[in-house]
Image (spheres, helix red, strand yellow):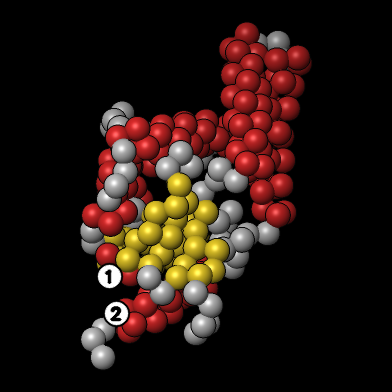
Amino acid sequence: MSEVERIEIRSAVWKAALAYTGAAAFALMGLALVVFSESLIEAIVGLIGFVFFGVFGAIGFYQRVRGQHHRVAVSRAGLEVYFPGVGWRRIPWGDIEEITVLDIAGQKFTGVRLRSYEALLAGLTPEQSRAAARLFASMRLFGRATAVLLGNSRLGRLLGGSEPVDDLSGMLAFSRERFGAELLFGWAQRDRNARDFAEFLRKWQRAGEADSKPR
């Protein structure tokens, strides 16, 4: 177990580059439909795809440059998660019910199930909480659009529905009900595979809980 006080996980730069390259590719696919398709419906779909992925890709790149992207860190005091629009939030290890690996639409995620939201939400202003929910809603829309273009009906069903998600608490509850855990760490947030990352978090959890026991 590391004696370092805090470690921020830094995923490889190529992962972010791959994500933005994918968004650019979808945007170009949409443009190709607009230019070459003889069907009005396909042209409209292409135009929507071009605007949608082009805009989201540009926004994502800008936020990445400014450091406004989903990040994670560990310390003996707890798991720390950076929510864009909110900032760093610490979750005490005792508030974590389980750290597991989840398969969502064919992709492996490290999932963190919480037994309490109290520390995570403590001190948040209503505006900060709504800001996190707005980002979640935009990413949900982005995921649904990707599912349509890829023909991934399973992913579309997971991200579908009309449930209102108005704040951070609602976002966490939606994620737990729909995906199986409040917090999901995909390949873009990790520095290793989902199973190894789960074990890495468990080791820090065990160390943190040992520190908190009376001596």
Q: Which of 46 and 197 is in front in this view?
A: 197
Question: Neighbour class for label 1 at 10 Å: few (<14), some, many (≥20)?
Answer: some
Residue drawn at 34 percent across, 61 percent down? 91
Local secondary structure at mark 1 = helix
Q: Residue beneath label 2, please? A: 212
Residues 143 and 118: in front is: 118
Where does the image place residue 158, in percent across and percent down from the top left?
Answer: 38, 42
Give the number of the disc on residue 168: none
User: Residue at left 38%, top 70%?
Assistant: 77
Report whether residue 148 is seen: no
Place of residue 175 in the rendered image (x, y in percent of width and height, measured from the top left)? 34, 47
Residue 122 horizontal side relative to residue 53, left or right: left
Looking at the image, tell me whether mark 2 or mark 1 is earlier in sequence order.
1
User: For the residue marked with disc 1, what is the amino acid?
Assistant: Gly
Residue 129 place in picture, x, y as percent: 34, 38
Which residue corresponds to the image point at 31% horizontal and 54% vertical from the top-left? Answer: 120
Does residue 118 appear in the picture of this structure?
yes
Which secondary structure lies at badge 2?
Answer: helix
Amino acid type of the residue tagged 2 in the rendering: Ser
Question: Decide: marks 2, 1 in contact (CB < 8 A)?
Answer: yes
Which disc, if any, is residue 94?
A: 1
Residue 131, quarter of picture: top left
Quarter of the figure that contains the C terminus: bottom left
* 87 to 107, vertically: above or below: above
Residue 60, image quadrant:
top right
Question: Where does residue 178 sit, x and y in percent of width and height?
Answer: 32, 46
> Front-most of 6 and 165?
6
Q: How far apart are marks 2 and 1 (CA)?
A: 9 Å
Q: Is 76 positioned to the left or the right of 97 in the image?
A: right
